[in-house]
Amino acid sequence: MRHRVFVYGTLLRGEVNHYLLAAACYLGPHRTDPCFSLHNLGAYPGLARGGHTAISGEIYELGESGLCKLDRLEDYPRLYDRVQVPSRFGRAWIYLYRGSLKDKPLIRSGDWRVLTDDRNSVRASAVLLRRDPKTRIAWSRRPAASA
């Protein structure tokens, strides 16, 4: 069975966990309806329903084993829940954060890359160098983001 997945954080092209999508088919960029909030959890973002922000990301198509890899990364169903959202490519899975978002900064743009693209930014360095089990690859080894 094939699955479509909407990614919005460390799974994006050029980000530290994108290697998990090596066997997936990139379908294209996507922006959700404005019904979410995106929060900076430190080394990765957390997405929640109930906000007023459209979230920027990418849609991929992958097989069952690829989805299982993403489930492991996202610690589904303990840390993240997985639900489907509409996209121009058809319904796609999206991971929603289940933990507390109290005192977690809101990413008002809805775009994780706003925090991580500028490698000379002190803010990007702080986010990308944070040690976390979900972001094991050092920022210095992170491939450059494609345009």
Image (spheres, helix red, strand yellow):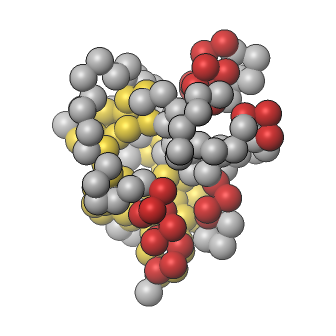
Compared across the picture, whether 23 is left or right of 35 comes to right
User: Residue lying furthest left in this view?
Assistant: 50
* Count of numbered tags: 0
Q: Nearer the viewer, residue 23 or 79?
A: 79
Please provide percent x and percent y for residue 72.
45, 62
Q: Is residue 81 above or below residue 41?
A: below
Residue located 53% across and 46% down the image: 134
Which x, y percent locates residue 28?
58, 58
Q: Residue 19, relative to residue 124: is it above or below? A: below
Residue 109 at x, y percent in the picture: 45, 26
Q: Is residue 135 left or right of residue 67?
A: right
Q: Residue at left 44%, top 36%?
A: 45
In the image, 90 versus 82, the foreground residue is 82
Res 132 quadrant in image: top right
Q: Is residue 20 above or below residue 34?
A: below
Quadrant of the image containing the C terminus: top right
